[in-house]
Each structure stands twice: as structure tokens, then as C-alpha cells.
Image (tube, coloured by chain):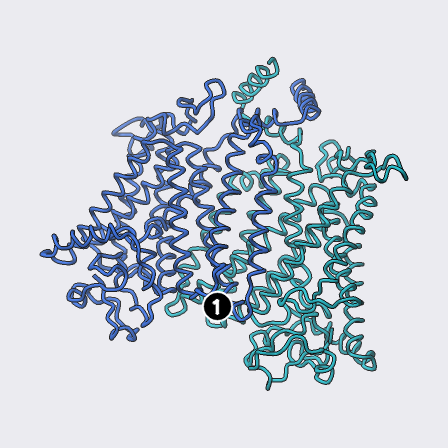
Chain colours: A blue, B cyan
């Protein structure tokens, strides 16, 4: 539903405030998907340049395109604005249901899906770099980028696995050297990639190659750390994954609704369709929604228990003593309200949820603005056209990234408690002399 | 190894200069004019680079260290009789010597001073690279770029060094009323600081400058990633024992000097187009001398407890531990000589660290130089000769420390793999930090396990 006719391309002073319906209703969108498929809401962007950097990218998901074409014919009677709205809405539902189904399959499946989504987002961003920087003559770029992705994931996930399940892996003959020398292996893998990059430097391509090297590393830094933190959150308890993700989803949807119905004042030039009404309305609804959902989720033990390997039963623990954060506590109502109700039974997590909601609605959107700025800088509409109505995976997950990082920091500040199990593992990992020394120190200390 | 640069503007657009032209013949007659503004000041050895573009990106950078320039001018007058090639060689040699003596003096001052100096050098390297970015990307209209870059440097250093300090001295800081909340909320504080910078960046985005701003954002973050992690690892190495800082740094210095010497006297076959003055003879000669030097030097250093002991806070004397029981790595062990050599000597008394030094030397001489190639490629990409002109004869700080970065990372991984053992003290501290119920649970689990 956006315009990109060549004649308008060099006019960079198109006023962003034009009502979309009037100027663009008659033109059908032509570049990214080839069908009149709806795109993201940032339709008022500067027009694409004559040699659109993004034009070559989208040659994927032909089945979805066929479906879209069929669908388009069905809805052809309706107003294009509503058509976009309906398709967006349908796929939002599809994604939410998919998310719910995923969560029910358990933490290991969720972790794998997080990894797959990370790879997909990486692919989208690398494709953009590949096209924008016109690096067709540099065959090494793709190989090196994927190699660095593999290496950083291997290193980070290996560290996590060893941290959680290290004692288990020590017993296995094949895994044991991989565990002991893990850091060295990871480092040497990365160094090989680094040496490969230096060897691949070609005269007159230096600046482009260095730019792409930096581009790849920034992308990795963002994607790999955030997905790794997300999985560490899951290890602390599924609720620490479900809840922040739902907060961002709720904020997105509510801000959209409020903006749709009441939107007047634009928020920022980066995303002209976001409005202050949407921002504030979304924020308030997220606070309320978060408070209620936090109370519901705290009931379920399988959401609240950290991922622990139960030595006795040789499997993942299913029940546990929840940390005080997830135990109902009685709070006395502050003076003004105590007329109605003396005490209030809440989960402390519900109070923490207010802070998480506040972050999700105020700072979370900056992830979206960052991505919008990035798209404008590289003159593309969307990261990809994988999800009709929504763009690529990266378009959906840009706010989740910063939320996952915040949640991880929040857990380590307010919710993580040293686990006796982990300490025991450390003691068992000591050499016999050190273990003796440790026991000696322990006995000395307790005699005091 | 000519000291003077060909920067005749008429040649600037000719990019097909043949690298194999004997430098002495073509360039002896022309004086270097661009980088330092002083006639004939020596620069780094990569003199055969593609000529600078007509609007040299790096030309505006060098406006510093006027006192060193005066000194250089004076020295130049003294040496003006000499052959320019030898003049460069002498100044380079003098400053190499100055740096080595300064390094030795620094080590004497102890680990805390060394850590501080590493931090200062990191800041200086960051300044050099950011200045480059500022000039190359012509971001004069973006006043926020400098502020944000320095802010991100501050934030990342605060976060990383805080984590280290808390890891090592946490129990000490928890007793202090002022520091205690800083310790408990450290991660949150660090994260919020960073997020403010991020939000500041997004708010500073100006229409039509998007690509430039994002490029600089990425540039700053890559620089931070490289500099902050490596200096942090260097300091972690120091905490394991001064030898883990002193030894790798010496290996790289030795490799640089030896490769230069071998290249100077025997150099014929060129190593790579990135650094045309490096030769295979220099590479291999430097490598072998580094192996030998490392082996001997390692044996010398292992004798000194002040180098070998990890940095630990001794609660009884309320100061840093001065003596300790060295790891088995640093204790003389007897090795049986392998069959061929056992005719001469039955057994050999070595420190195991000397055998490990062979691996470290191998890395320093084979992979270490790639840090230098990377920096050379970077300089060619951005069409500059040096990162700065701070050290006469050598360029900027970054020129000296580019190989040290990758060596510091390797050393850190090496320690974690071969030399670090979980310290009983640290685990005890963690046990004491547990709440009483958890402590009982821990003791119960421990007893159960020991009974088996």
C-alpha cells in the first residue's frame, strides 16, 4: 500500500504528514513483494532511490506469496487500508497462537526456536549488507559472516551448557575434552576466521571489506548476546521469557490500537506513524495487563521453576520451592486506600512487573526507532517480506532484543540467588588437594 | 626502509604504482611533507603504500605533541648529515629503547600501576581511532558523535572493570556502606548507563545523516569491543600473576624487533601485499628467535615470586599478598630427556611454564602479526599512514599495540585452559554469602556426597 513510482523518487521533500489514504490509495506497491501485499506501518518513509538497494532482496517464500495473491483476490473489494489491517491482524493472531503453542512445548524447544529465529534475523541483516554494499565480487564475505555466526554461537552456548550441565559432561569420554578445552577451541575457531579475513583482503576493496567486517560483528554482537540472554532467562524460569515477550507484544498491539483510533500527535520523525496517544495509551494498558498476567503466571510451578537437572531422577526438575518473588505475600494497603481494603495479597513479582512494564513501554520502543533509523539509513522498507503485513523477523523482534537484555540484568539484580547445587558442583570440580583445603577452610570458619 | 614519503600530489591519482621499485632510488630525493608538518620526520615502515588521495583524509589529524616535534626537529638538525635511511633507523631505535626502558620501569612499580597505565593506553588508543573516524567520515556537523563515543567508552569500562573488581574484592566492598549498593546494583547501573547512551543516540538521529550516524555508531562499538575487551583481559591476566602480562608482551616486542632485524639484513621475499616491507625471512627469523628468547626468558621469570603469584588480598595483613605457593606450572620439575638426547644428559630440570612458553611464542610469532596486518589493512582502507604521530619513528599508540591485543586475548584463554584452577578461597566466599537456609542445604548436600 505504499508508493514507489520512479517519477516520485527524486523528490525527497515529500511531506511526511500527508494522509496516506489520499495520496497513495490509487497506487499499488510494486517493489518488495511484487504483489499488492501489505507492508509495515512506516509507509511515509522517504521514497526509495532509483536503484533501490532493497529491490533485489525479496525472492523468498513463494508459497506465502501464492497464498497472498489468492487472499488478495478475495479481499479485493475492500478498502486497501482495511485490507492491510485485516491481513496484519490475521498474521498477528497466527503469531500469537504459534507463540502459545511453542511455550507449551517446554523450555528446550523454546531455546531451539530462539536459536533458529536468531539465525533467521542474522540472515536478513546480512542480506541487506550484502546488497547495500554491493559486495558481489567478494565471495568470502558470506562465508566468513556465517562462520563468525557459528563460532560465536558455539562459544557462548558452550559456555552456558558447561555452566549448567558441566558436571554431567565430565563423565562422558567424548565430551570431556570439549568441555576442558572449550574456551581454547572457541578462541582458535574465531582466530581462524580472523586470519581468513585478513588473508581475504583484496586491493581496492579494503574499505568495503572492513565495513562489512564491522557490520557483521555489530550484527553478531546484538543478535547473539540477546538470544543468549534470552536463553539464560529461560533457564531461570519460563516466566522470565514469557512475561517480557508478552509485555512487548501487548505494548505493540495496544500502541497500534490507540494510535489507530486516537492518534494525532506524531512521536518522532523516524517513525511517522507512531503517535504520543498510542505511546501513552499503550504504556498504561501494558502496565495493567502486566500486573494481571504476572499474577496469573506466578501460579504455575512449571513456569516459575528454574531449569535444573535433578541428579536423583536423571532429568529436568519439574517442581521446586519457588523463590520468595513468586510466593503470595500480604501487603498492607497504604493509608489512602486502607478504607476499602486493609491488606492485599499479591505476588511480589506483580510489583516487579510494574517496573518491567514501564521499561517495555518507554525504552522498548527505542529498539523499534533504532531499527527504523537503520532502515531509513539503508533506504529499505522492511528487513524482509517473510511475514505478510509485518515484514521480516527482525521487524518483529527489534524491541524484544533490548527487553531480553533488561530482563537478564533484572534477574541477576533482583531474583538470582546463589544455588547450593551449583556451589556443590564447583566443589566437586576441584582437584583433591584443593578440595581438602576447601574443607579445611570451611571447618575453620564454622568453628568461629 | 626509506624514511621519506613520496607524496607528490601529481602522483596521487596514479594507483598503479609498482611496489617493487627500489625505494632508495625514487624517494631519496623527495621530502615527506604531509603527516607531521615537520620536514623529514620519520614514519612507520609501511612507506610503500598507495599514495594518499588528493583530499587526504588523514591530513588534518596530526596537530599534537608539539614538544616532541621540537625535539624531533632538533634531532633532525643534528642528524641532517646522515643518510635519511639511517636517520630514520636511529630515531626509531632511540625511541624503541626509550619505550623498553619505560616498560621495565613500569613493571617495577607493581600490578596496580600497570593496570592503571593499561587503562590510560586504552583511552589513548580509543582517542586515536575515534579521531580517525571523525575525520574520515567528516562528521563535523554531528556534535553528538564525540560525546556519545566517549560516553560509551566510559560506560563499558565502568561495567567491565566493576565486574572484575567485584569478582576479586567484592567481599571487601560489601563492608563499606557507600560501595555496597554500587556492588549490589552494579549490573543494573551499568545497563541503565548504556541504555541512556543508546536512547541518546536514537534521539540524535538527524534526517539525511542516518547512514553516517549509524556507520559511526558501528565504528565506535567495534572499536570499544576490541579495545575494552583486550585491555580488560590484560588486567585479568595481571591478576593471575604479573608474569602473564610481562611474558606475552615481551614475546611480541621480541618478535617485532627480531623480525625487523632479520628483515633488515636478510629480507628478500615479500610476505603480503598489505605490509610490503615485511618479508618471509623476517617472519621466520623472528619466529625462531622468539621461541628461543621465550624459552630462556620464561626460565628467568619463573624464579621471581613477585611475578608468579596471583593478585590476592590477604585478609590477615590487610594488603596484597606478597608470597604464595606457586602453581605447579611454576615449580621446577625434572623431565626425562627423550631417547636421542639422553646420551648427553639424562634428565632436564625445567619449569613446565617453559614448555608452555613454546606454545605462546608460536602463537605470538605466527598469529600475532595478523593483528598488525589487520591494522595495516585498516590504515590502507582509510588511506592513512599511521594512527597518529605520537611516537616519533613509530606512529601512534595503536601502531605499537595492535599485535598486543590478540596476544592478550590468547593469553587469557590460555590461562583459563591450562593454568587457572578454581580457588578454594573464592568458593568459600560464595558459601559464606549464602543465606543461612541455603548454607545448611549446601552443607547437607556436601555431607551426603562425601559419604558416597
Report the residue that reaches farthest toward the front: B340
Report the residue that reaches farthest toward the top: B451
User: Which of these two is toward me, B50 or B63?
Assistant: B50
Image position of A161 (left or right of B395): left
Give SS at disc 1.
Answer: helix
Q: Look at 83% across and 82% down and name the residue there.
A: B81
Per the image, the residue denoted by label 1 is: B143
Report the residue that reaches farthest toward the bottom: B10
Q: Look at 48% across and 37% down and name the residue there.
A: A412
Which percent across, then down, holds residue A4? 25, 68
Q: Look at 33% across and 63% down and name the residue there.
A: A56
User: Which of these two is toward me, B197 or B363?
Assistant: B363
Q: Look at 39% across and 41% down and name the residue there.
A: A114
Image position of B354 (left or right of A338): right
Q: Which quarter of the figure is the C terminus of chain B placed in?
A: top right
- Mark 1 crowdedness (10 Å alpha carbons): few <14, some 14-19, many ≥20: few
Q: Is residue B131 above or below residue B359?
A: below
Q: Which quarter of the figure is the N terminus of chain B placed in?
A: bottom right
Q: Is residue B448 above or below residue A47?
A: above
Report the residue that reaches farthest toward the right: B344
Question: Where on the picture, by quarter, is residue B353?
Answer: top right
Question: Where on the picture, by quarter, is residue B370?
Answer: bottom right
User: Which of these two is toward me, B445 or A145?
Assistant: A145
User: Which of these two is toward me, B237 or B375?
Assistant: B375
Q: Chain under label 1?
A: B
Which percent across, then down, holds residue B92? 77, 69
Q: Is residue B302 above or below residue B390?
A: above
Which percent across, then down, holds residue A357? 34, 42
Amino acid at each position: 500500500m505504499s508508493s514507489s513510482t520512479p517519477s516520485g523518487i527524486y523528490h525527497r521533500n515529500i511531506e511526511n504528514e500527508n494522509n496516506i489514504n489520499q495520496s497513495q490509495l490509487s497506487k499499488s506497491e510494486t517493489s518488495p513483494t511484487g504483489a499488492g501485499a501489505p507492508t509495515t506501518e512506516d509507509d511515509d518513509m522517504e521514497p526509495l532511490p532509483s536503484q533501490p538497494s532493497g529491490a533485489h532482496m525479496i525472492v523468498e517464500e513463494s508459497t506465502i506469496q501464492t497464498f497472498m495473491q489468492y487472499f488478495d483476490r478475495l479481499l479485493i473489494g475492500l478498502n486497501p487500508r482495511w485490507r492491510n489491517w485485516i491481513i496484519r491482524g490475521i498474521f498477528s493472531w497466527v503469531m500469537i497462537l504459534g507463540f502459545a503453542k511453542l511455550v507449551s512445548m517446554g523450555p528446550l524447544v523454546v531455546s531451539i526456536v530462539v536459536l533458529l529465529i536468531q539465525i533467521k534475523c542474522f540472515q536478513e541483516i546480512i542480506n541487506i549488507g550484502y546488497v547495500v554494499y554491493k559486495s558481489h565480487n567478494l565471495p568470502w564475505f558470506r562465508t566468513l559472516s556465517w562462520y563468525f555466526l557459528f563460532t560465536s554461537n558455539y562459544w557462548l552456548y558452550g559456555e552456558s551448557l558447561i555452566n549448567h550441565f558441566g558436571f554431567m559432561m565430565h563423565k562422558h569420554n567424548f565430551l570431556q575434552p570439549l568441555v576442558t578445552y572449550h574456551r581454547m577451541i572457541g578462541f582458535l575457531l574465531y582466530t581462524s576466521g580472523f586470519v581468513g579475513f585478513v588473508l581475504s583482503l583484496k586491493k581496492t576493496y579494503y574499505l568495503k571489506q572492513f565495513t562489512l567486517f564491522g557490520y557483521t560483528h555489530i550484527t553478531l554482537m546484538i543478535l547473539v548476546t540477546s538470544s543468549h540472554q534470552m536463553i539464560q532467562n529461560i533457564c531461570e524460569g519460563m516466566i522470565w521469557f514469557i512475561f517480557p515477550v508478552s509485555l512487548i507484544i501487548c505494548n505493540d498491539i495496544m500502541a497500534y490500537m490507540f494510535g489507530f483510533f486516537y492518534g494525532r500527535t506524531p512521536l518522532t520523525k523516524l517513525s511517522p506513524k507512531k503517535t504520543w496517544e498510542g505511546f501513552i495509551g499503550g504504556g498504561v494498558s501494558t502496565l495493567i495487563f502486566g500486573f494481571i498476567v504476572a499474577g496469573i503466571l506466578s501460579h504455575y510451578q512449571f513456569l516459575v521453576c528454574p531449569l535444573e537437572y535433578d541428579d536423583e531422577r536423571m532429568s529436568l526438575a519439574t517442581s521446586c520451592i519457588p523463590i520468595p518473588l513468586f510466593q503470595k505475600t500480604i501487603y498492607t494497603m497504604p493509608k489512602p486506600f486502607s478504607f476499602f481494603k486493609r491488606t492485599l495479597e499479591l505476588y511480589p513479582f506483580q510489583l516487579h512487573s510494574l517496573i518491567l512494564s514501564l521499561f517495555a513501554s518507554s525504552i522498548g520502543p527505542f529498539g523499534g526507532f533504532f531499527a527504523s533509523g537503520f532502515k531509513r539509513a539503508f533506504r529499505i522498507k522492511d528487513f524482509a517480506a517473510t511475514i505478510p503485513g509485518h515484514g521480516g523477523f527482525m521487524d518483529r523482534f527489534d524491541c524484544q532484543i533490548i527487553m531480553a537484555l533488561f530482563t537478564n540484568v533484572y534477574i541477576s539484580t533482583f531474583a538470582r540467588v546463589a544455588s547450593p547445587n551449583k556451589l556443590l558442583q564447583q566443589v566437586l570440580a576441584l582437584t583433591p588437594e584443593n578440595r581438602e583445603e576447601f574443607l579445611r577452610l570451611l571447618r575453620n570458619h564454622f568453628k568461629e
